[in-house]
Image: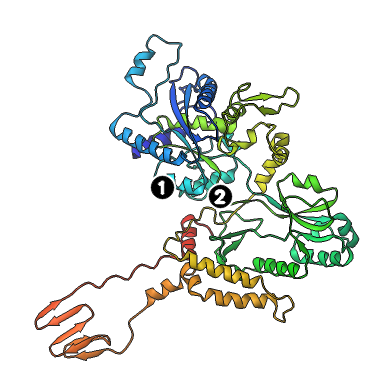
Amino acid sequence: MKKRLLAFLVAVTCLVMPVLTSCSDEEAEIKSDTKPVTVTLYGIKGEGTTDEAVKAVQDRLNVYSEGNLTTRVLLKLFTEDEYYAKLDEAFAAAEEYEENGDNSSSSTSNKDKNKGTKNELVFPDEKGTQVDIFMVRGSEMFEKYNKAEYTVSLNLADKSGLMRKYISDRYFALTNMATLGVLGNKYPFGIPNNTVYGEYTYLLVNKEVANAYGYAEKNLDTLPELNNLLVDAARDFSSYVTLYNAPTIDLDNFGGTMFGTVIENTDTAFTKKSPTSLLENEKYIEYAKYLNLFNGKGYIVEGDAHALPTDKKVAAAFIKGNAALPEQYKNDYLVVPYAKPVMEDLGTVFCVSKYAVEPVRALEIVNLLQTNVEYRNIFQYGIEDVHYRVDDYTGVLDIISKDYNMNPADTGNLFLLKENSSMDAATKALCANNWELAKQQLRDTVVAPYLLFNPDVSELDYDGFKAESDSVLARLMSYDIGSAETFEEYAASLNAAFKNTDAYINFADNSAAVALAEETTTGEETTAGDETTAPDETTTGDETTAGDETTAGDETTTESAPEEPAVPDRVLVQYESWCARYNIK
């Protein structure tokens, strides 16, 4: 295994995308006379996709990869429900084949076949159950296959300029971090697909209202400033909806509890933000305070989170959408970016298997899905005039067949995808001008601080803590705005009680474990003869019983006391350990 991995690392260091060069200057780059190789690609197919369609698309992909890279690809596509079970079966079979047979990319029979066919490429058959390239969705599955050591490090170093041009540095850092690498390492264990995450939250302010009081975008980006406008609007524009939709807040909390942090517009997965009770987070308290106030004043009317109403005028509104939304409303509203999109999990990642017959050649195919427009769109849409047609005037694709359906997030770099007529208006706006707005949205996307932190809560009382959290939240949001006690004082008293509950201590805080470790036996000891007896021991005649030790005459029997059960690390302790592991400060 170690020799296999070392050989791969040496080979892949010499990789220049999309052309492969060897470590020796005397060896040529890949051309049509390079040794033919067959690789497999495991992925998820959409509903209705037929085996016949997959085979046809596979053949069309191979027209390009066989002609340019002398690499044949075998598509192994399964439905979402069956995919991971099938992938696990394939890995088990590949492991067994490697242990019992030769998993090299060539064989004697293939060499014999090639004799006398100098100008004909003969591609080897699949070796056993061959796993070369496979995709996973999300950090949990990515972590699963890395922990199982089914992936290999893709040592792209600084020679992968083309692929790095197409894929965000942030993605490479995240995939590397997710595979127990060192922060800043350039050698990830997977190639992530560029995609669009989350939505912006925009504050829209009616220009008529704003102009009446001299408000501008720059002084409307906080809730206290918004409150001043709403007071004016409620008084002077009484026929308007004062606030359409309540303000929201992005949280990275554990299972929807009151323990975590507020996601801010500058957050990354590489900035330490220790989880705490949300009741002692200043930004959360400010949010809760003004949410209570706006509700108490009757300002809020809830409606469509993604569009303004057409039957009433609105003074201000919170609306969610993508990077194209400002263009839609800019004529009549000040558009204030209130919260950026949040990446709460990794998207789809392509990995090269440790059982790959030619890891470097497999990586070339992944490279095509990230950098080659033709190859990437064939994998997504299929074959022209079979699965789609192209409008001669607009260049937009029209889907004409339902037997080949793929999720764009699973088939490669989103920003190379051609527009199709089935896209909704929001997606069409994103893909205009070579996906310029989508690229901007990705650049703006905030990474949730705990995206790659997955604490083990299996032995912690999550249900009890969630119930306590829900109770505290309900009390927080029932604050009487007419109370003599300030909201901050009210929240502080709730927080003190919350952090003192068994539910909080047993789930979030490790003070119970610390107390257990420091616990010592107290109480006055007594002495009987030459033996010492603690208060819970009893002495009768010539026999003394002390815990599990019994002495009778000259005979002594000692039984080991059962060890105290280990107290599981609370979430906070696990986070501190995780930060130390990755040098996150």
Of all residues, the one furthest to the top in this rendering is 116
Indicate the colouring scheme: rainbow
**Above or below — where is 482 with respect to 234?**
below
Q: Nearer the viewer, mark 2 or mark 1?
A: 2
CA neighbours of label 2 inside 10 A, class few (<14), some (14 to 19), many (20+): some
The spot of residue 526 in percent (x, y) is 24, 90
Total numbered circles: 2
Instruction: Answer yes or no: is residue 23 visible.
Output: no
- CB atoms of marks 2 and 1 within 8 Å: no
Q: Is residue 245 left or right of residue 12?
A: right
For the residues labelled 2 and 1, the Cα–Cα distance comes to: 18 Å
Residue 147: mark in rendering: 1
Q: Which residue is mark 2?
A: 345
Query: Which of the 4 image quadrants contains residue 252?
Result: bottom right
Q: For the residue labelled by badge 1, is the local secondary structure a helix, a strand or a loop?
A: helix
The spot of residue 205 in percent (x, y) is 81, 56
Judging depth in this view, the residue of 44 and 16 nearest the camera is 44
The spot of residue 394 in percent (x, y) is 74, 27
Q: In the image, what residue type sits under mark 1?
A: Lys
Judging depth in this view, the residue of 520 and 505 nearest the camera is 505
Q: Quadrant of the image for the N terminus?
A: top left
